[in-house]
Amino acid sequence: MVNSSTEASVSRDTAVQIQGVNFSYGSKQVLHDVTMDIPTKQVTAFIGPSGCGKSTLIRCINRINDRIPNARITSGSIRVHDIDIHRPDINMNELRRRVGMVFQKYNPFAKSIYENVVYGLRIAGVSKRSELDEAAEKALTSAALWNEVKDRLNSSAFGLSGGQQQRLCIARVIATEPDIVLMDEPCAALDPLATLKIEELIHELKQNYTIVIVTHNMSQATRCSDRTAFMYLGNLIEYGDTMQIFENPSNPQTEAYISGRFG
Amino acid sequence: MIDPEILIRKGMPRGYFKDIFVRLALGSVTYLILIIALLLFARIIIDGAPAIFSTKFPFVDIEFLTAKNETLHVFDDAEGTRHQLPASKYNEYLDAHPGATIYNEKTFSYSGGGIAGPIAGTALLTLGAIILALFFGVSAAIYLAEYAKQSPFIHAVRLAILNLAGIPSIVFGLFGFSVFVLAVPVITNTPSDRSLLVIPLLINDFALSFQGWNSSLMAGCATLACMILPVIITASEESLRAVPQGFRDASLAMGATRWQTIRKCVLPYSMPGILTSSLLAITRVAGETAPIMFTAAVAAKDDFPWEGLSNPFDILSSQVQALPYHIYTLAARIPNSEFTQRAQYGSVLVFLILVAVLSFGSMLLRAKLRAKLKW
């Protein structure tokens, strides 16, 4: 009884609980016993050198890794709002709608800007034009893109600049009003100015969404995250408040990485 | 210190004549091929043009393209004028000149009238085969590219499909004959005597009888579809794989199901490739003789396939004439003479024009769709 009540109190402000996760691509283990709680309505950053497993970890949270043959969690569990996402009766479509994802390479569909934004609603079965219009405007406004595209909603998404396309992808994700937004190096393919806009946007979005962001860029982590997790070779080395991690890391490996001595 | 003089050649450079010889040899082989092709086309165009073009407006012999195929009668009348008339006109002539004496009469099968029957038959066969092949081929390609796990078994399946493309078309013809013409099940209340197996359905005497579709349009379409399936499956699978993975990731991450993702984010973008490949397959279907010889084609038929049917679906069970089979019949099964040339070369030229139009159409379509889709 005591146990379950503490767990319930934890889960109210914990969006994702990762417990002892081991993950393998075939015989190659890429995550070793990762345990962490991701708080709601905050920005959590995963940092670490390439190949440390941070992208793999974020891709486990919406189970998009299921698409890769032989890739699987060998032990441990991931709970989203206290529901184990690997239980057999999980509604995968609803899970992915609640846990949206923005990819490293912006990937709008070869459709109009409008159709990109309302895609999630359309596949959820919404077909009323007024409802779609309203959601599109709301999502594009939240993604700070409305003023730039309102006059050309029906032109191709490929006519936008890279930064605009990435913000369109963010708008597409938040149009379905998810709880959690996963961002896998969202600025990796963008120039500094477009990066700045995305960072401002992340700051706005955390009022309403839990955000998990993978980044290579340590100054980006300090600028826009509340919590930071440092990963190295598939292990979670250190996880805590961003200020503490960057100013007073408790692990020597973390200190070495953030001070630029390796990675 | 090097001697700068060695940079200046003395006499012919090494291998100079060998190089010229190789260049000439390769060039002459290439132009020889070109000349053969040009002679072939020139012969067909020169001999075929009188059959389908005319000097008067609208410069096309509409009758050759729209009239039914008939026997050609060649004869001299009493004044010594030579007449060449198709059977129907010949009968009109006899009616108009009762008692006229006719000299030196000769008849040439299939050489009079037009080739509307073969054109219509080829159109129907091609349309039916392409619809069947696209449905089955694209379905299989979607399964192979999007659903199937990449196991050794699936690789074996893919290899088997690829190998189908190497089977000679006559083998497909015989396969179609033994399966579609003689063996596939039909539901009927009067099973044929040669039915392989009759399973009573217990509803009004109806039975599932494995007696085949006979030689018919649908047996021909099915055989032709089998023949081009490997092309369609391979090309469609490649077009599906060419669609960026990001589209699928994004769609699945939005909570779309597999099928929603395929229907909305993959198929629309692979359509240009699928359509182009199927257009090329059309030219192959339209031109094959062997697969339809035993399964659908007849040399002579008085009616169009759609004429004299009580039920529009009966067109599927009717036999048809077909352009390539017509060309074969004219070339190999009747005695050739100056009077059969018009029909022979005319048919070939019409067929060549048809293939050229389809190929050109596929190039245009590809260019147009490519320009519209970019990522």
Image: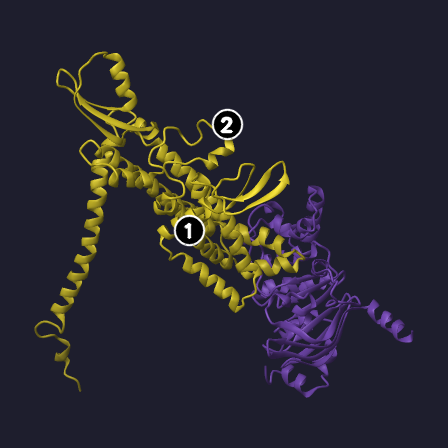
Label 1 packing within 10 angstroms: few (<14), some (14-19), many (20+): some
The residue carrying mark 2 is B310
* Residue A167 seen: no
Query: Which residue type carries mark 1?
Result: Phe
The numbered mark at residue B188 is none
B248 or A88, nearer to the observer = A88
Quarter of the image for residue A78 reads bottom right
A89 or B364, nearer to the observer = A89
- Residue A233, position as x, y percentages in the image: 62, 81
- Residue A11, position as x, y percentages in the image: 82, 69
**Chain under label 2?**
B
| Colour chosen for chain B | yellow
- Residue B69, position as x, y percentages in the image: 32, 30
Label 2 packing within 10 angstroms: few (<14), some (14-19), many (20+): few
- Residue B115, position as x, y percentages in the image: 32, 32
Q: Where the N terminus of chain B falls, by quadrant?
A: bottom left
Which residue corresponds to the image point at 28% horizontal and 24% vertical from the top-left? Answer: B87
The scheme the figure's colours follow is by chain
A46 or B222, nearer to the observer = B222
The residue carrying mark 1 is B175
**Chain under label 1?**
B
The local secondary structure at tag 1 comes to helix
Query: Which residue type carries mark 2?
Result: Ser
Q: Tag 2 or tag 1, which sits nearer the N-term?
A: 1
Which residue corresponds to the image point at 21% horizontal and 34% vertical from the top-left? Answer: B341
B244 on left or right of B97? right
